Amino acid sequence: MNTVFYLYICVGWVRAFSPQSALFAYTSNKASVGGDKKSLSQHEMSATLNEVPRLKRTNSFTEWAKSNDIQIGGLQVGSTSPSSGLGLIASQNLKEGDLLVTVPSKLALTVQNPGEDNSKMLSLLRNDGNNGSDIYRDAPWFVQLSLQLNALDMNLIQGGESNDGINMKSWLESLPRKFDTPIHWSQSTIDELQYRFMSQSVSLQKSRWETEYTNISQNSNIFSSSKLSFDNFVWGCECARSRAFSGAYSGSAFNPAPYTFTLLLVAVYLGLGFGTMEQAANGAAVVVCASILKDFVLPKWNKSKKYVICPFIDMANHVGMGENGEVAFEYFSDAYSLAVKKAPNNGEEFFISYGPRSNDQLLQYYGFVEKNNPHDVYIMPPLREWDIDALEKACGRTFSPGRLQKLDRAGLLGLQGGYASEDTFASNEAGGVVITRAGGVDPAVIQALRALVSSDEEWDAAGQAVGNFALEYSGGQQNERLARLAAKTAIEMELASKPTTIAEDEELLRRSKASKSMELSNEETLAVMFRIEKKKILEEIIKTL
């Protein structure tokens, strides 16, 4: 009897940790991979598609969505003006809490990081003959999604859980074929941003994406340079960076089968007299607890993250604050949903939030600039590159060389010869000074400046320790005033170094709209809008210091 009971427990644990129950796991179907399809891929049709207005290309997409069990109510794909991009528009009056869209998870493109287990892609690359599957597993999430998009685009795989014949062509045609992001700009246009940090970030992005492409094309026959061009690889990366949403991986969707099987075992266990009701309940509890552990606890423990491109929901545009909807995964229905958080009026655009994105991120990866973005930042050069002589003159003090050495050892001067991260301020590898619209100058920088400007008496009173300058007024009122003056002086110098003022930039935009002969290109317009927003942050923070 005890043997049966422990076997029962084992069934629960096997169920909980079986790879077959992983969320969105695909089963390989070699017969439908590649095949004898004669239709042109999207890459071959890209020249034609670029000539067709994107809105017209989305007409068949909505019908495709409905025919593949995407439930849509109260929204339609469109634009609010001829000059605006495509988005989701309210087609009726909505109210808070309305469920507007549900998309079966089998239609979504997903990447789990770490632990990517897309069996369709891994099988495709494993049969490639090289170590392509390992290259795929080790690639960044957006590269993995780019390869998925390109595999669909090249008819190497099909949509659905098991290559089960879901034709994704209509959705692929709805995607943008070109992006107005700085990676495509000339260096002279990037210079018009008047922002060194973005120039560094774009340069690093180009270098890293070229490295990823070379690594893949040289280790895969399927994605060799003769079959997958760098431009199409970049297209996939940009679709992934601009259309995927992410969150902590929350395990598999609800599967009733193991619970049904558990009830059956309980009935057999009791009916044949193998044990008591208490023992059967204990065994059932193990199955339930193991499922909860697998679906909710272990993913958070392992810090797994899921990246998802979800057809139709990916048409929603971003707003920094006051978004209309929110995206969620429906555990019991195994689908992604879009629900109303703040109802727009009929005919207004329905926005979601991509998260707290600065204009650095929005321009670099999405191709637009948000005016008065509450999440915007400005990355100044590291403290070690600041003009110390100018700060000493402003403060009326000579800074002790020993303080600079202390700050350097504490890592507060930034890196010598550092570089910007591809993900901009989120991982500021150079140690640049971060200024946020919401919070002002990084508190660690103000702490460093308190130590830097301190007199010998203030330094001794703090125990000659940088850490004792962490709190406001920790060095005294005069010390606090001079620390803020040093920060203000450095920011004023940064603003004064710009070739144009905000007023001149705004006049340039006004003339571009008023006169055809003065009209700026889209890239130039974005560059001017971007630098205006960056200068506004500096002006705002100067007023607070």
Image (spheres, grey):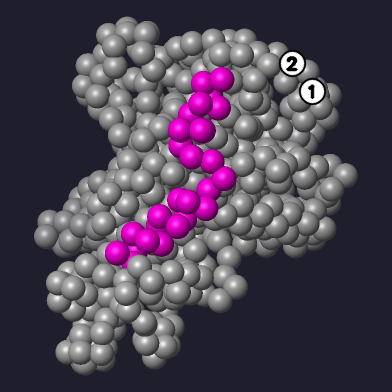
Q: Is residue 450 above or below residue 190?
A: below
Q: Which residue shows up at 71% across the image and 32% down it? A: 153
Residue under numbered circle 1:
47
Q: Which residue shows up at 43% across the image and 39% down it? A: 533
- Magenta span main SS: helix
Q: Is residue 502 magenta?
A: yes
Q: Is residue 399 above or below residue 530?
A: below
Q: Is residue 466 magenta?
A: no
> Identity of the amino acid at label 1?
Ala
Position of the C terminus by quadrant: bottom left
Nearest the eye: 326 or 37: 326
Nearest the eye: 419 or 245: 419
**Res. 215 image quadrant:** bottom right
> Identity of the amino acid at label 2?
Glu
Q: Position of residue 426 (x, y in %)?
A: 44, 57
Position of the N terminus by quadrant: bottom left
Q: Position of residue 246 (x, y in %)?
A: 43, 45
Q: Is residue 403 above or below residue 495?
A: below
Residue under numbered circle 2:
51
- Report whether 108 appears left or right of 4: right
**Res. 54 image quadrant:** top right
Q: CA distance from mark 1 to mark 2?
A: 7 Å
- Report whether 502 appears left or right of 219: left
Residue located farthest toward the right when viewing the structure as drawn: 226
